[in-house]
Image (cartoon, grey):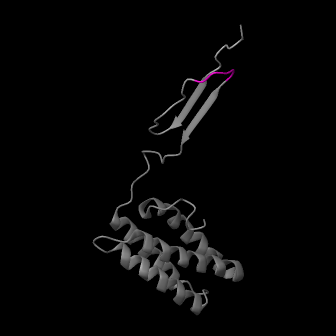
Amino acid sequence: MTNNPGGISQSMSGGEMHGGMQAVQGNHNQQTMKNNVAPSAEKQLTQEDVVRMLAQIEQMVDEFPSLPEADKEKSLRYLGAASEEAQADEPDKQLAAGNLKRMTETLKATNETVESTKTLWENVKPILQELPGWFGVAQTFFGL
């Protein structure tokens, strides 16, 4: 006779999980499932929240004195397009997120080359970190 002590072990963490281990022959079988779900306590942003946050970023960018004018105009153009789309009755969230990503890339590039813009980036970044869920994009989408 062969020795088969049935070493099946399962662990699950995260939100709602489906599936599981099928009957398997062999020793010391193991399955681990993880589901990275945002905590339920995390506030879901409304369209109004997002529009307000984008307006807040726009004000910061527009009023930042040492941001080079070309970068300011480019950032505001992308941000304006994202904001306009976010305000639509049925917003195209991918289009808005894409424009917001371009604005982010512009500010990040400026931040890397113009030392005096670090304060602007430090103020804009926390707002951007709250937005991916509403836009339906990955937390890393904006490159933060």
Q: Closest to the observer: 12 or 49?
A: 12
Q: Position of residue 75 (x, y in %)?
A: 53, 83
Residue in the picture at 47% in, 80% down: 79
Is residue 131 left or right of 30 when viewed as pictured? left
* Image height of 64 relative to 34, above or below: below
* Image height of 105 relative to 10, above or below: below
* Image height of 75 relative to 25, above or below: below
Q: Residue furthest left?
A: 89
Q: Residue furthest top?
A: 1
Residue in the picture at 59% in, 80% down: 106
Is residue 8 left or right of 136 when viewed as pictured? right
Q: Which residues are magenta?
A: 24-28
Q: Quadrant of the C terminus?
A: bottom right
Q: Closest to the observer: 33 or 103?
A: 33
**How many discs mark residues in the rendered view?**
0
Residue in the picture at 47% in, 37% down: 17
Is residue 92 left or right of 28 when viewed as pictured? left
Q: Position of residue 77 (x, y in %)?
A: 47, 86
Q: Position of residue 31 (x, y in %)?
A: 61, 31
Q: Quadrant of residue 133?
A: bottom left
> Magenta stretch: dominant SS?
loop
Q: Quadrant of the N terminus?
A: top right
Residue in the picture at 47% in, 45% down: 39
Is residue 38 left or right of 84 when viewed as pictured? right
Q: Residue furthest bottom?
A: 69
Q: Position of residue 137 (x, y in %)?
A: 49, 62
Q: Closest to the observer: 123 or 88?
A: 88
Q: Quadrant of residue 11?
A: top right
Q: Is residue 105 magenta?
A: no
